[in-house]
Amino acid sequence: GQNIDQPTEMTATEGAIVQINCTYQTSGFNGLFWYQQHAGEAPTFLSYNVLDGLEEKGRFSSFLSRSKGYSYLLLKELQMKDSASYLCAVRGDDYKLSFGAGTTVTVRA
Amino acid sequence: EAQVTQNPRYLITVTGKKLTVTCSQNMNHEYMSWYRQDPGLGLRQIYYSMNVEVTDKGDVPEGYKVSRKEKRNFPLILESPSPNQTSLYFCASSPTGQAGSPLHFGNGTRLTVT
């Protein structure tokens, strides 16, 4: 089966940087996704990593180390609208996409 | 507008009364999937479909049925709902089920079974 772990909650100040870690143990690996989900809304796609290294997209960056089964999502210059849950998801050998329980980020003024 | 449409958004029903949650996408996506989301458990896959007439069980398929007779529609059927199926349900689609194809989610259906 798939095991995907991420912290339950994180709190940070507006303008700061927050790093959300995700560790995984899966049957095979065909990529890792990060999604953002605001309360009461649908998840929306943020980033995709399949090779080791850092992918940067504006204020958001995502890093992957396949040998360590580890990824992180870096949110820079935090804004109040970044308060949301961030979901780590891994696609395994069977191409099923499995999600972690999500990390709720609260941004304080 | 490209979207995944689920109906209804909210549904309250009683144990044992059959119900269907509809899902439709207008992006010509091959892959469609149903998830349920529960506090502390995250999104868990119920069923998925790689293409028309091809469906497979996800991680929590018990008590659910699906069908994929047309590319755009992927309804979720609960033949005899029970209270443990009270949850937030999401339908999602992607161009294919391969590698880097990201999911597009519908707005969710909040189901309460009493």
Image (tube, coloured by chain):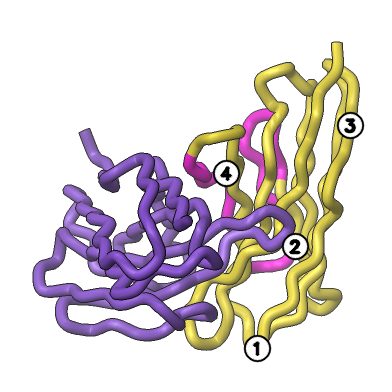
The label nearer to you, 3 versus 4, is: 3
Is A83 a magenta residue?
no
The residue sitting at 23% across, 64% down in the picture is: B75
- The chain drawn in purple is B
N-term-proximal mark, 1 vs 2: 1
Residue A26 at what x, y percent from top left?
A: 69, 82
Q: CA distance from mark 3 to mark 1?
A: 32 Å
Judged from the image, the secondary structure of the residue bearing numbered disc 3 is: strand
Residue type at tag 2: Leu
The label nearer to you, 1 versus 2, is: 1
Give the numbered dot on residue A27.
Answer: 1
Q: Which residue position is annotated with label 4?
A: A46
Q: Chain of mark 2?
A: A
Q: Which residue position is annotated with label 3?
A: A11
As drawn, B36 above or below A18: below
Q: Mostly what secondary structure, the magenta segment?
A: strand
The residue sitting at 30% across, 61% down in the picture is: B95
Task: Between residue B14 and residue A56, name the one nearer to us.
Answer: B14
* Circles 3 and 1 on the same subunit: yes
Is A58 a magenta residue?
yes
